[in-house]
Image: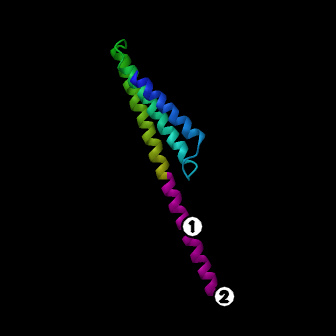
C-alpha cells in the first residue's frame, strides 16, 4: 500500500511538472520529469523484486533492470552536463576570438 501511495505521489509530481514550467530554464523541467520517471520505474521494480512469488532468476533480472535504469539515468545526466560545459566553453572562445578580431580591425584604422 505504501509503494502505491509513493507511486501515485510521483505520478502527481510528474503531471505537475509537465503542466507547469516551474523553472526559468525551459529544458530543466524535462530533466526533472525524466528524474521523476526514473524514480517511478525503480520503485515499481523494487516492488516486484520484493514479491515472494517471484523466483530467484526473476529477482536477478529485476535487479539488473534496476542497475541498467539507474546507469542510463546517470550516463544521460552526466552527458548533458558535459555537452553544456563544452558548448559554454566554445561560446566563450568564439566571443574572445571575435573581440580580438574587432580590436585588430580598430587598430588598423
Pick whichever, 35 or 83, lies toward us. 35
Residue 52 shown left or right of residue 101 in the figure: left
Identify the main secondary structure in magenta.
helix
Between marks 2 and 1, how big is the CA–CA gap?
23 Å
What residue range appears in magenta? 83-109
- The picture quadrant where one finds residue 19 is top right
Residue 76, image x and y in percent?
48, 42
Give the residue drawn at x 58%, y 46%.
21
Residue 49 shown left or right of residue 82 in the figure: left
Closer to the chain start, of discs 2 and 1, is: 1
Residue 77, image x and y in percent?
46, 44
Relative to residue 81, is residue 108 depicted above or below? below
Pick whichever, 98 or 22, lies toward us. 22
The residue under label 1 is 94
The residue under label 2 is 109
Location of the C terminus by quadrant is bottom right
Q: Which colour scheme is used?
A: rainbow
Location of the N terminus by quadrant is top left
Relative to residue 83, is residue 51 depicted above or below? above
Residue 33, image x and y in percent?
52, 39
Task: Assess whether residue 101 is covered by the magenta stretch.
Answer: yes
- The picture quadrant where one finds residue 62 is top left
Task: Assess whether residue 89 is covered by the magenta stretch.
Answer: yes
Amino acid at each position: 500500500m505504501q509503494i502505491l501511495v509513493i507511486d501515485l505521489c510521483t505520478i502527481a509530481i510528474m503531471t505537475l511538472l509537465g503542466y507547469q514550467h516551474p523553472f526559468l530554464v525551459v529544458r530543466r523541467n524535462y530533466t526533472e520529469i525524466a528524474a521523476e520517471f526514473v524514480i517511478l520505474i525503480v520503485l515499481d521494480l523494487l516492488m516486484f523484486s520484493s514479491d515472494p512469488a517471484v523466483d530467484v532468476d526473476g529477482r536477478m533480472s529485476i535487479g539488473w533492470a534496476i542497475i541498467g535504469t539507474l546507469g542510463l539515468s546517470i550516463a544521460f545526466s552526466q552527458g548533458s552536463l558535459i555537452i553544456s560545459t563544452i558548448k559554454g566553453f566554445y561560446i566563450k572562445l568564439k566571443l574572445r576570438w571575435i573581440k580580438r578580431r574587432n580590436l585588430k580591425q580598430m587598430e588598423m584604422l
